[in-house]
Image (cartoon, rainbow, N blue to C red):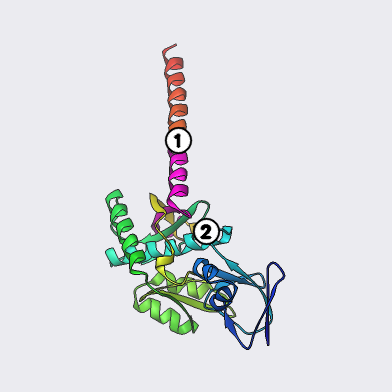
Amino acid sequence: MLNITLLDGKKLQFPGKVTGHEIAKTISPSLAKKALVIKVNDIFKDLSTFIEKDSTVQIITLEDDYGLEVIRHDTAHVLAMAVQELFKDTQVTIGPVIENGFYYDFSRKKTFTDEDLVKIEEKMREIIDRDEPTTREVWDRDKAIEHFKKKGELYKAEIINSIPNKEELSIYFHGKWHDLCRGPHLTSTGKIGKAFKLTKLAGAYWRGDSNNEMLQRIYGTCWRNKKELDEYLQRIEEAEKRDHRKLGKVMDLFHFQEES
């Protein structure tokens, strides 16, 4: 028998290997609907992961801080997916979760505009509505490098080359679109929800080195629900107003000193 210990100390038994989703469903059907990923012996994993040894398991939902982090991570992937559906000549590089949101760096000859951000956001919502299934594959290093080079994804090939040989290379698919990623991820794009917004454009050198290409960075924010999103956007707006007022006072003082 396989013994699964939950966070509250309760123990569940299964006749053989079991997935995170099956554990959540055993606890309650409502939890299975809310489940995003699992934590197995302090390591976060996909819900579809098979557990074959006695383990301590926590079901992660949006109520958990890490649940919000996963949602933001998936939203970053959907951002990259949307960009490549709209702008075929674009290479993707990295797209981490950051405080209050995420960003993704792109290599593209033409500069993104604010109008492009609106189109990208619309495409992201479309991808979420499509509810593309998310799956994980482990690839051989040489296969992965060759694959991404053939696709013209030279940055991804470079990243793979820099990963230690002993480390597993996982590729996540959202429908047919795929990316190199450690994960974990949601079971489908529809799980993300729509409490997100793309916030700004910026430049960033590849690997932070000014000798490398200047990439285009798209920032976004993502929250549990629309209320949290609206509250965050309002806080940002108020902070910007304060900064403008503060700058205005400094400029007025500067002009006063100049005139005197």
The picture places residue 225, in percent across and down from the top left corner, at 45, 53
Please name the residue that numbered disc 1 is placed on.
238
Could you tell whether 63 is left or right of 236 in the image? right
Q: Is residue 77 magenta?
A: no
* Dot 1 alpha-carbon crowd within 10 angstroms: few under 14, some 14 to 19, many 20 or more: few
Q: Amino acid at mark 2?
A: Leu
- Determine the secondary structure under disc 1: helix
Q: Is residue 81 left or right of residue 221?
A: left
Image quarter of residue 194: bottom left
Span shown in magenta:
210-238
Q: Residues within 10 Å of mark 2 (few under 14, many from 20)?
A: many
Task: Identify the residue at horizontal 42%, vertical 69% (top origin).
Answer: 155
Query: Based on the displayed image, in which of its 4 quarters is residue 26 positioned?
Result: bottom right
Measured from the top left, where is residue 217 in percent x and y?
Answer: 40, 55
Mark 2, residue position: 68
- Residue ID at (67%, 73%): 41
Can residue 115 be seen here?
Answer: yes
Give the number of the disc on residue 145.
none
Select label 2 or label 1 by which is in front. Answer: 2
Q: Is residue 202 above or below residue 73?
A: above
Mark 2 vs mark 1: which is more N-terminal? 2
Q: Identify residue type, mark 1.
A: Glu
Q: Can you give x and y, in whole percent of width and height, for residue 32 in the image?
A: 52, 71
At 47% across and 27% down in the image, what residue appears? 246
Q: CA distance from mark 2 to mark 1?
A: 24 Å
Quadrant where the N terminus sits is bottom right
Q: Is residue 111 left or right of residue 138?
A: left
Asked if 163 appears above or below 236 in the picture, the reply is below
Q: Per the image, is 216 magenta?
A: yes
